[in-house]
Amino acid sequence: MDENRQQTMTSASLPAHARLPINHCNLPPVILGCLTFQHHPTPLHLDGVEQLHAALFQSLDPITDADTRAEHFKDYMRSSFLLDNLDEAGFDALKSGVKRGKADYLRILRGWLFDADSKEAAVLKSWIESRFGLLPLNHKGPLGDGGEDNYQAYLSARAQGLYNTNALESQLDLLYSYCQYEVARQYTGESHVTLYRGINRIDEHEILHQPAKNIYILALNNINSFSSNRERADEFGDYILEAKVPLTKLLYMPGLLPSTLKGEVEYLVIGGVYEVKVSLL
């Protein structure tokens, strides 16, 4: 086996510091986070979510219009999590203290789209960690060696974001499952989508291997924003990462909730090891 091939095979694995040993998914972190999964993805299912909410997906099946399905999904979320009746969910407006009843899945999405280092972003990274077993690598800076202060800040933001909320992680479970339902209907027979991400420096990411001049094997953060528009991605950095992203790793895609998140064109991509092409616009 030549040296380059051996290095590529070694770099295909997600480093131990970037994953947990277990998760709440049908595949373990070491599998869903590796390079082989990027090239040959299979469906990901969160434990029990589709079974618990089977009635939702059965009700969506006969609806042919995606926008109508989105409205149906939001109605289901309001009903299942009592989002319009927070008193029934146990919130008391008269009590003092931190009131987080309105911290729902939509606020988490908006918070991430506004600032990928916000407390809402910390909640998303924490949810990915719990459900998929992929550890966050960056939040307001690197979280690995030498990033102890950053890690403590991340833990604090995560705790603040989750405190006194209404089954927030379960709401995100259902958001992911709904996104995957829509992926299956809108991308029939497809396994990947080509997406772009603007960066300022390649060393912002953990480089595992460089098999060619403009090809890198990277360990990405456990959740990332991408765009389907190369020119749009250039607004966020001088260099462009181009990746073939498994559809099974989409948490959110443009148009998923059209009447709520109008104009948002970002894809939220679950991390792991990715082969990317790096270029200048």
Image (tube, rainbow, N blue to C red):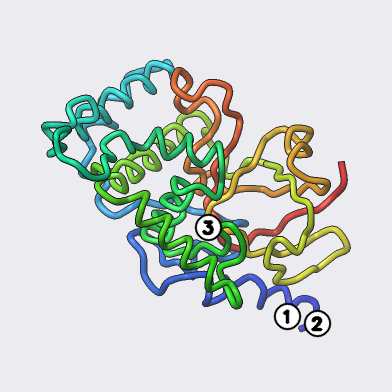
The residue located at (19%, 41%) in the rendering is 96
Q: Earlier in the sequence, mark 2 or mark 3?
A: 2
Q: Amino acid at mark 2?
A: Asp
Q: Which residue is mark 1?
A: 6
Where residue 176 appears, as percent x and y from the top left, is 40, 42
Q: CA distance from mark 1 to mark 3?
A: 26 Å
Asked whether disc 1 touches disc 2, contact meaning CB atoms under 8 Å apart, the reply is yes
Residue corresponding to mark 3: 222
Query: Could you tell which of marks 1 and 3 lies nearer the N-terminus?
Result: 1
Question: Which residue is painted at 67% across and 73% down in the image?
Answer: 11
Q: Which residue is mark 2?
A: 2
Secondary-structure class at tag 3 = strand
**Kind of residue sitting beneath label 3:** Asn
Q: Nearer the viewer, mark 2 or mark 3?
A: 3
Q: Residues within 10 Å of mark 1 (few under 14, many from 20)?
A: few
Position of the C terminus, as image quadrant, is top right
* Residue drawn where x is 43% and y is 36% of the image: 179
275 shown above or below 116 = below
State the CA–CA distance, disc 1 to disc 2.
6 Å
Residue 90 appears in which quarter of the rendering?
A: top left
Quarter-wise, where is residue 157 in the image?
A: bottom left
Q: Nearer the viewer, mark 1 or mark 3?
A: 3
- Element type at mark 2: loop
Q: Position of residue 222 (x, y in %)?
A: 53, 58
Residue for point 53% across, 34% down: 253
State the residue in front, 189 or 108.
108
